[in-house]
Amino acid sequence: MAKRILVTGAGGFIGHHLVKRLKAEGNWVRGADIKLPEYEASAADEFELLDLRNYENCLLATRGGIDQVYNLAADMGGIGYITAYLADISRNNILINVHMLEASRQNAVAKFLFSSSACVYAQSKQKSPDVTPLVEEDAHPADPEPGYGWEKLFAEEMCRYYRHDHKLATYFVRFHNVYGPLGTYDGGKEKAPAAISRKVAMARDGGEIEIWGDGEQTRSFMYIDDCVEGLLRLMASDYHDALNLGTDQLVTINELVDMVSAAAGKKLVKRHDLNKPQGVRGRNSDNTRLNKVLGWSPSISLDQGLAVTYKWIEDELRKKTRIPVQSQTQKGSA
Ligand SMILES: NC(=O)c1ccc[n+]([C@@H]2O[C@H](COP(=O)([O-])OP(=O)(O)OC[C@H]3O[C@@H](n4cnc5c(N)ncnc54)[C@H](O)[C@@H]3O)[C@@H](O)[C@H]2O)c1
């Protein structure tokens, strides 16, 4: 049955894709964000420009019989950004999350989903590139990423408390590195797959590419369509505890660069900058609980997803004339 749904952060990467999917399934959708989507118009029925750190704005966003809230709004970015702005990120996101929870309660929203992150996991469990995949219990005892990880962990707790005290049906999900087209690829907030795609697109074949750290740090990456599918499945479930949402295909950043270079048809020399932040040494998702709870797990391969993402970023850079427009001969031989 069609629902009335609010997506916060609808001007951002995951929110924008989620709105499209919810609309395609026949729902009525309101998007809220401090900015409009950057690369194409929102599919939302209503899109409201609101600063959700402000409680009154959260009340506005949740007004009018909203059934479900996907609370994706957050001040966030890649490892460079989240390690540089600890106080600002924490303050901004705590305000958004506590106000969105309370406004959802006040406006009698039935279901509230909060987008948490693998950054909540204890850093002590992520010291080796050959990391043991993280199970949901590995977030405690708490030792998360400073700033961003702590505020996510606190917001997860707030979700538990609102369910306990106020019977609000809360959900929270820990994303592991989501990537795909229509995501930020420059400006400082971009994450590894987008940053690497941009660098590869801008490098000449045979040229150099700068990599943060020694490139042996490991991660798993989830394509955006799998992320959106997981979100819908979780919201339709009656599971209210912590849940990983990611793939368990572990790759080093060096391997990720090789995959993007292959998608671009380029051979590049890697130059490692050991002074740049690289985050935890290794991180992977254990999907045992995800499979059990949702009867599903992400299946789009990294090769497939990167090919689409790289192509989109390359096209964007051409449109902005930051790389030369392809000649007919080059196009023919590609
Ligand atoms: N992309 C990932 O790999 C990843 C990983 C873990 C967790 N997450 C979480 O998923 C959610 C969505 O991430 P994303 O990748 O789409 O990021 P994004 O930055 O593209 O989207 C977040 C959106 O929130 C909006 N926002 C920030 N402050 C706001 C405010 N005060 N009021 C209203 N809107 C505000 C931003 O303008 C942005 O459009 C976030 O909560 C993020 O922490 C994402």
Image (spheres, rainbow, N blue to C red):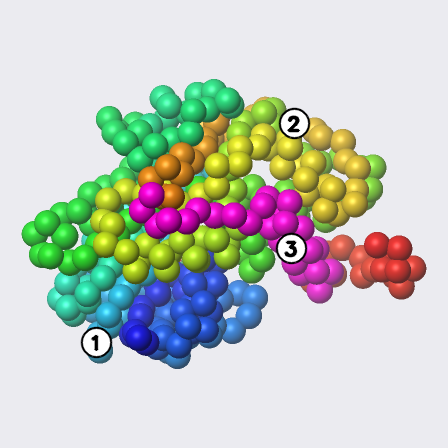
Q: Is residue 149 above or below residue 232?
A: above
Estimate the x, y position of residue 277 in percent, counting from the top left: 51, 31
Three-letter residue code for mark 1: Gly
Label 2 CA crowd tier, 10 Å (few <14, some 14–19, many 20+): some
Residue 297 belongs to magenta span: yes
Closest to the camera, between mark 1 and mark 2, is: 1
Assign a secondary structure to mark 2: strand
Q: What's the residue at 31%, 46% (across, down)?
A: 293
Q: Is residue 317 above or below residue 259?
A: below
**Quarter assignment of residue 124:** top left
From this viewpoint, which residue is outermost toward the left? 165
1 or 2: tag closer to the N-terminus: 1
How far is the residue under mark 3 from the one under mark 1?
38 Å
Estimate the x, y position of residue 209 in percent, counting from the top left: 71, 36
Magenta-drawn stretch, dominant element (helix, strand or loop): helix
Three-letter residue code for mark 3: Val
Estimate the x, y position of residue 29 in percent, counting from the top left: 36, 74
Residue 115 belongs to magenta span: no
Q: In the rendered structure, which segment of residues is drawn in magenta? A: 292-319
Query: Does the residue at mark 3 contact the one at mark 2 (Cβ under 8 Å)?
Result: no
Q: Which mark is residue 308?
A: 3
How far is the residue under mark 1 from the one under mark 2?
52 Å
The answer to whether residue 185 is left or right of residue 234 is right
Three-letter residue code for mark 2: His
Assign a secondary structure to mark 3: helix
Query: Does the residue at mark 1 contact the one at mark 2 (Cβ under 8 Å)?
Result: no
- Which residue corresponds to mark 2? 272
Task: Decide which of 157, 26 is in the foreground and name it.
Answer: 26
3 or 2: tag closer to the N-terminus: 2
Q: What's the residue at 49%, 66% (across, down)?
A: 37
- Which residue corresponds to mark 1? 65
